[in-house]
Every structure is written in structure tokens, then in C-alpha cells.
Image: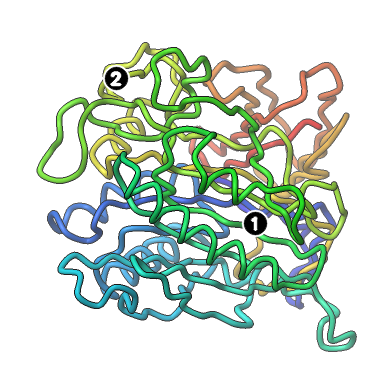
Amino acid sequence: MKKLLLLALLGISQLSSAQLNIDVLSYNVLNFPNGGADRIDTLKKVLSYYTPDLMLVQELKSEAGLQSITDALTEISPVTYVSGNWVSQQSNPSSSWKLQQNIIYNTEMFSLAEESVILTDYRDINYFKLYLNDVDLGMTMDTVYLHVYVTHLKSSQGAANELIRYEMSQIMRSEIEGLPANSYVLCGGDFNIYTSTEAAYQHLIDPTVNNFLEDPINMPGNWHDSGFPNKEILTQSTRLTSLSDGAGGGIDDRFDFVLHSEALGLGNTDLSYVDGTYDALGNNGTCYNQDLTNCTSVGNVPDSIISALYYCSDHLPVVFSLQSDVALSVSENYLSETSIYPNPTSSKITISNSSNDNIRAVLSDLKGKIISSTEFLNEISLDLAELKMGVYLMSIYRDDELIEQERIIRN
């Protein structure tokens, strides 16, 4: 789904003149690639629906698995993706069941400045320092940095497991405190935390420390309890009964998080979190203790993607967007025939197409309800001022063929 849409200036290096939208996805991919050769095909369906610019990956079993996901993103996108370096789990060397985390990122948007493995007594925490490919970087030697921590805390209930999660969170929190003040930080993964009162969670969101972390949806409570009201934020398990691998029990836990530093929540123009974009992809709030595929049919994604999410993993991915006013230097193969700008917008958007063909633009909400359908030749402006603030989907068709989709943020 998407991509960054650019104004066409063919034949030369291109600059983005619109607001840069950065889609992020964090996903526990369940012992990937174990479980059969068709797993990558199922995952590709999910990634074709929501194609991230930055993917935080947990439960990797091998470098080959990481590379296959990286290759899949490059295949379904007009740009090249790369991952961080593969380093087998270093922590807890006596463990017989080793898992690893990593990132995969859009190379037109990001470059990797630094990466490291942070050791704990239980499992590695992986750190990556990315920067935006600012068009002026060669001249100014200055750009925007994004610090990304990917973790998979100890699973299961009980005081001993909670203590291990707390100790891992202490190590990660200490690393984040050591960054320069007002750093842009993402801290994501499978946290395996059951309630907002757990020590690990409270330590991570401590507001008294440098670069303190915020939970972008701020819905505290006992996420494992049937009385918790906001069941649409739960992420595990997609299956009532375990398949060949993974947990059963239906959707009844919020294990998967991405927290961000205070600086990303301030609305800074160079980089900020986009309010209202955080979502447990595929959970419409009616899935408690059920198979994902058996939930009430008012889903926010198509049934085919619900099925792919069910079979792909026992976790749902967490998705959200960042935005920046940094202009990128972008190669010609990243150009789209269609440009949609500005995005985000508080009023109008303009859609232009360089193909000289008749184009149909269909605006819908994330549940699939069509808001408008408009045909045009080269350019059209649409007034979105009457829409509620939130995220919408713009689908562009040529001769009834879907050629582009973009998430439109009405702010």
C-alpha cells in the first residue's frame, strides 16, 4: 500500500516537494522462516497491503529468513529495501531456542549510520541508527536521525518472567537515556507485557528521564482481562487453536508495542509521529478470544488480508506513520506516475497524473466504505475539509486496473 508520491521531473534527480510520509510496521513473524516454503507468500500478501518504509521484525530464526522478507519488500515495491546485518543471538548462549530481531528499510528514504547488539541475560536487543537521505546532506553534512530499538522481552506470566522483562527494559531504557537529549527514538517489538502496571512497562514510560518514551495510544489497563474496553488494540493470538506453531487462545493480549520518544510527539516538522495512525492491523475490536477469521465482518482490511494475517503469525502487526518536511534526493525508478499532495492535509488534496490516460480516484475509509469516486485526465483537486480527522485510503485506477494506493491523513 502507498508509496511516497513525487512531483514528476523526469530524467534528473528528483526532489519531494510534498510532506514526506513514513509508514512503519512492527511484526512478530513467528519463528520465520520455519513452517514451510509458502510462508513468505503469505507474508507478501500482508506486506503488499501495507508496505512499510521501515519494518521492525521479531522472531527471526535465520539470516535466510531475514533476506527473504527483504527481497519480498523489494519485489512488491518500486524501491530497494535492505536489512541490518544479521548477527545470531549473542545473549544467553546456553539457550537451545534462539531468536533474533532486525529492521528492513526503504533505501530511497533511509540510510543506516550505526547498528549494535545490546546484550542481556535472556535475549539480544537490537539497535539501529538511521538517517533520512536529505537532498542537501552532501552540502550541509546534516540530516535527521532516527534511533530504533527492536526487542522481544521474556514471555509468560509469573513473577520470575516479569522480573526478566523488567531487567531487559532497564538495559534498553539505560541505552536510550544515553542518547543526546531530544533524540527521535522508536522502541518496538514483542513486549509480552500483560498489564500497564507491570514494572517493565512503567519503567519504559517513566517521564522523569532523558528521552522518555510515550505510548502513542495511551490506553492503560489489564490488557489480558475480558473487561478491558479497547479490544481493538490487542495483538495476540490470531488463532483460537494453535496451528502447527505459535500460540492459541484467540485475541486476548496486547503484547506488541511501538513506543516513541517525547520528541517524536511534539509535532516537529523535521520528524514527528502522526496522531491517529497507530493500529493493530486487522483487529476491528470484535475478535476477543476468537480466531481472527471468525470476527464480526466489519473489518478494516479485506477478508483476503485477514486470512493472510491469520496464517502468517500468531501476532498481528502494529502499524503507524511518521512525517517529515525533509526533501529527499530520489532516483528515477522511485517516481510514480501519480502525485498526491499535500499529505497530510487539513483541507484540499491535489492529484496529478503524467500518463495522459483517464484516471479514476476512489477515496474510502479504512473499512472500505467509498466516500467519493472521481474521474479526471491530468489533474484534479478534492476538498476534504468536511471529513473527520483520521486516515483514509485513496485508490487510483486506470482502465479499472488498480495502479496505486496511498493512505491519506486528514489532520
Expressed as whole percent of the image width and height from the top left, the position of residue 53 reads 57, 58
Q: Can residue 277 be seen in this view?
A: yes
> Label 2: which residue?
289
Q: Is residue 91 left or right of residue 211?
A: left
Residue 306's image quarter? Answer: top left
Residue located at (86% from left, 79% from top): 136
Q: Nearer the viewer, residue 346 or 168?
A: 168
Residue located at (51% from left, 57% from top): 169
Expressed as whole percent of the image width and height from the top left, the position of residue 293 reads 28, 23
Q: Distance between the residues labelled 2 and 1?
A: 42 Å
Q: Which of 103 and 388 is in front in this view?
A: 103
Residue located at (59% from left, 34% from top): 395
Residue located at (81% from left, 35% from top): 380
Q: In this view, does 350 lie to the left or right of 335?
A: right
Q: What label does residue 336 carry, if any?
A: 1
Expressed as whole percent of the image width and height from the top left, the position of residue 100 reads 34, 67
The quadrant of the image that shows the C terminus is top right
Residue 329's image quarter? Answer: bottom right
Residue 328's image quarter? Answer: bottom right
Q: In this view, does 97 lie to the left or right of 128?
A: left
Task: Label 2, secondary structure: give it.
Answer: loop
Q: Nearer the viewer, residue 400 or 158?
A: 158
